Image: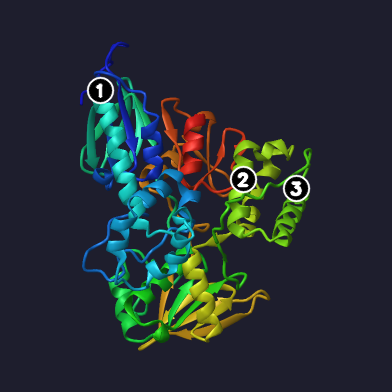
Amino acid sequence: MNDTVRSETHAKTHLIVGDGTTAVAFLEKCTLGTGDKLIILGKNASELGRGAAYAKGNDGDTWRYAYLLNSPADDIDREFAQWLTDNWQRIRSTMEGRTPNWLAAAQPLVDAGNIFGLNAPREFYGDFMCEHTETVLAGLRGKGVQIDILNDEATALDTTDAGIRVRTVANGDLIVDSVDIAPGGPSTLRIPGDEGAFGVPNVFGYEAQIAEHILAGREIFCIGGNAAMLDVLRLCQSLIPDAEIKMAFCAPDGEVPAPLIPRLPRKLTEPTFSKGHETAESFLNEVRREIDLALERGDEMREIRAGFRGHFLENPLSSYITDADEARSVPATLRFWLRGGTRDTILDLHDFIKGGQARIVTGLVKQVEHGTDSATVRVIDALGNVTSEETGFVINTAGAGPNSKYDPLTEDMLDKGLIEACPISKGIKVGDGLRSSLPAVRHLSPATTVIGEETMAMPLYDVHMLRHFVAKA
């Protein structure tokens, strides 16, 4: 395209960068009309809505459909929960005969009329999002909007007299009037030695290599006790009988996340907080009290998490804490206290721990060393002592950390000061209305922790929350 100044009456060209649920949230609020142009650009934009998290698996992979959503369906998206119900017979047919036996774990909830409470295979959520996206795109086409979908990656942006220039890997420079950027989260924290003869730096994309070691009967050691660790257990279960599984994981607290168990009738914990806290510590003391009271009443962690999430969407941290910097130190602790995960997998993991097939190592992994037939994991304990763990194969499931990297476009925007890294909340800070320092460019991702002067109390990892903040923008 030529970098020429356009008239104020020219048709608009809007660009959405991304291929996951955040990109769809922006798409749903797109206001283009007749004669305008929409470009959607992402690595897998042709299956917009899947992103990396809900990708389509390969028919020949035994682990296809093994990975489950972290939360019950209606906690993630009530429309998806209804879609699960409407498509239940097809889903049942797809899942018959698969290992692990998801249908058996699902049956009590199905019998209770609580399909909404299922932790569904993630690929099904991708199917739903693709169908939903096609409906939204059809509506825009019906309004006369021209839509181009490009499987590509954006790497940089700047301004010209003609508009916003976005550099891409395969399609050169795009000149557009406005941009909504919807990337995924940061990369996994790399650990020295996490890739070698007996280790890989991630589970996703390395399944075939990991499978060789699972089938060989090796103990599988995960760095980190988060959702990706639970995915590793599902991978093991898809390949070998439960009785043959040998697994370990290392986590700072040495604890398993709480299972998010759905119950009927559905309820949400309703916390009560006082206003005017001057420090994060004061407010967190009150939060801890409310969590403990809920647990004493018999509330499940799923009910507590969902209730707190809904509360903070309507009552931001600034309602309770007078100092913005103090508020920004709250989310890390809140996320730790309210952590939870996939019911099916966590309950299985507890059984493996009780039976001596899985073990927990408390501490932080310092490095991984590879021998001739095994790996040695160096772990720093709470006292600063370094201990050694001998194991069969190591998988880095640590999640993000201090040296994690974002996608190239987000890194470019950070380098140029168009968005900021918040030194307190350790996430991304954008302006009011999700805007960067360029008014025509907005940015939202699961790593966003500060919008304008408001700190996100809980991480933006589900469609409900993403839609909420896009709608507010």
**Residue placed most toward the observer, 85 or 15:** 85
**Residue placed most toward the observer, 455 or 367:** 455
The residue under label 1 is: 3
Looking at the rendered structure, the kind of residue marked 3 is Phe
Categorize mark 2 by other alpha carbons within 10 Å: few (<14), some (14-19), many (20+). many
The image quadrant of residue 293 is: bottom right
The residue under label 3 is: 283
Label 3 SS: helix
Q: Nearer the viewer, mark 2 or mark 1?
A: 2
Mark found first going from the N terminus, 2 or 3: 3
Q: Is residue 14 above or below residue 150?
A: above
Categorize mark 1 by other alpha carbons within 10 Å: few (<14), some (14-19), many (20+). few
What residue appears at the point 43 percent right and 32 percent down from the top-left corner?
A: 442
Looking at the rendered structure, the kind of residue marked 2 is Ala
The residue under label 2 is: 457
Categorize mark 3 by other alpha carbons within 10 Å: few (<14), some (14-19), many (20+). many
From the top left corner, tell me how far across and down residue 70 is, in percent: 47, 59
Label 1 SS: loop
Quarter the N terminus occupies: top left
